[in-house]
Image (cartoon, rainbow, N blue to C red):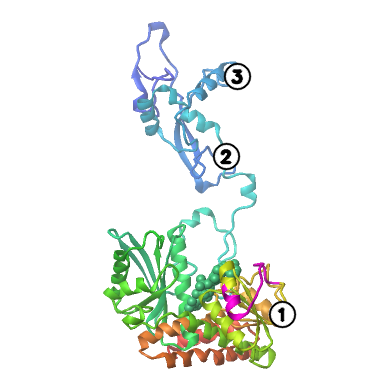
Amino acid sequence: MEVNKFSGKLATKKTPQELIVDAYFAKDQVQTEYDNSIITIEIDKISGRPATEFTPQFARIEKQVLRLSSIRPNAPSWQNPVTSWLEAHAKFLTSLGTIWDQIEASEIIEEDGPENLDLAFRIARLKDDVHNEFTQKNPPILQIISPRNRGVISPGIIEVKDLAKINPVFGNLAFDNHEQIVFCNDKETGLKAIIGIHNTNLGPALGGTRMRVYNNEAEALRDVLRLSRGMSYKAAITGLKLGGGKAVIIGDAKTQKTDALMRKFGEFVHSLGGKYITAEDMGMETRDMDIVREVTPYVTGISESLGGAGNPSPITAYGVFMGMKAAAKYKFGTDNLAGKKVLVQGIGHVGEVIVEMATKEGAEVIISDISIERLEFVSNKYGAKIHHDLDIYDLDMDIYAPCALGATINDNTIDRIRAKVIAGAANNQLLDEIKHGRILKEKGIAYAPDFLINAGGIINVYAEIGKYGKEQIIHQTENIYNTTLDIFKLSDEKQITTYQAAFDIAQARIDARKI
Ligand SMILES: NC(=O)c1ccc[n+]([C@@H]2O[C@H](COP(=O)([O-])OP(=O)(O)OC[C@H]3O[C@@H](n4cnc5c(N)ncnc54)[C@H](O)[C@@H]3O)[C@@H](O)[C@H]2O)c1
């Protein structure tokens, strides 16, 4: 007769073939009981453990497991020694939550011997610990926030099972009608890059290439989408015949960047036929752009010897200074900064030049930076006052110029800021453009939108494409002064934030397809 070799009971349809053996019984000892050691239980596919009353339907799957117990499972004196034996022989188990089925079980039995049979036993004793009373009462909620006005687009609960339905590209919150997204892959050089082309209504999409390590591909995609969209608005508000684009190369710029990789990236850029024009961004240097230039003309930020426009930072600083003066005119009635206390946070490539210009105009400049050497160097050179503490927000100042990091205007700082004007080079200074923009307006702080006043760099690289010289670059950068004043005016007329005013003008230009 066929029996389950472990239970010794008669095999049934559920008994795996591997466990069935032939058995011979003496006449008066014939086995009559059917094998009940294989049972079907519901497993939570997320926790990998038996479902409980809290396990939602979508997470339940049926699994057949081997139930190992003594012949009197409810009698502790019979069952406990069996339990101890099983536990003592559970050496190989590394992951207690592993979902398994009878095939895996039989393989284990074949290969590892009977001491490993406690798998089912263990699984059966550990209940689903992912779904419980708390998670049932407090299900995770996802709110979809509109990138435009921060309103909740789809209030309510999205069940975990629906996450699988989220479309990672077209459904990405930062997607915002991108025209094209190009995923570049090259096995030989290890290149993995994403080029985002947001909008080309006004001209070719121009934007730098950033190389950095990302936690995952979704993060890289979000970064490129967010940045390329920002470039559309920066170009439009600045009055350039350019669209918005950006690229990210996934990898460590210090250890993974090679000439071959940059050349391959250049080939991908070239394949777009000029729809996207690249430039430098984080993790890139002029030399890298020179390599890209070997394979495509669709690159800016190359060496001056190759026809490039050179280092953009002084021009960026000049534009920021123009925006600062316009904001001062709006707030103080004069754009002369003499006697004004100006705090420059971050005195790098851009910050230092702002210190120079503000000092020349007679402002009292205070500087803050994480680098002591930079502080001493810039202080010695321009006579600026060093503020050693990085926490600068309570300081007495007229103008705050963020030139280091983004998001410095946030819930923790906004009520402490004593400046009347904020104008700096850093990108994305407002943690929440809508909320913090509104609070600044309510507090009467004149905020010059970052993407408007730090556009000198893009004007500089645009000169390489538009084939115009330094004079025109300076002229166009100077115009940031007028545009900033226009933005303050519009913000007052329409009772909207300066960020929104700049954004609306840029959007209108993009929609009208003309500058
Ligand atoms: N360089 C350009 O043409 C350009 C164009 C547009 C926007 N920006 C933005 O302007 C900002 C400055 O650019 P950059 O080229 O001068 O960069 P940079 O790296 O040369 O300088 C940044 C400086 O900030 C300092 N810093 C870093 N963390 C700080 C902190 N917590 N507090 C105070 N200082 C800190 C650094 O030590 C460094 O001196 C960046 O946010 C950049 O994205 C630059």
Q: Say whether residue 42 is visible.
A: yes
Residue beneath disc 2? 52
Q: Is residue 5 above or below residue 399?
A: above
Nearest to viewer (mark 3 / mark 1): 1
Q: Is residue 47 above or below residue 357?
A: above
**Amino acid bearing label 2:** Thr
Membership of 53 in magenta stretch: no
The residue shown at (33%, 83%) is 307
The residue shown at (37%, 76%) is 278
Label 3 or label 2, whichever comes before in sequence order:
2
Q: Say whether residue 153 is visible.
A: no
**Amino acid bearing label 3:** Pro
Quadrant housing the N terminus? top left
- Which image quarter: residue 490? bottom right
Residue beneath disc 1? 443
Return the x and y of residue 210 as percentages of the image width and height. 42, 69
Give the residues in magenta.
377-393
Residues at discs 3 and 2 in contact (Cβ within 8 Å): no
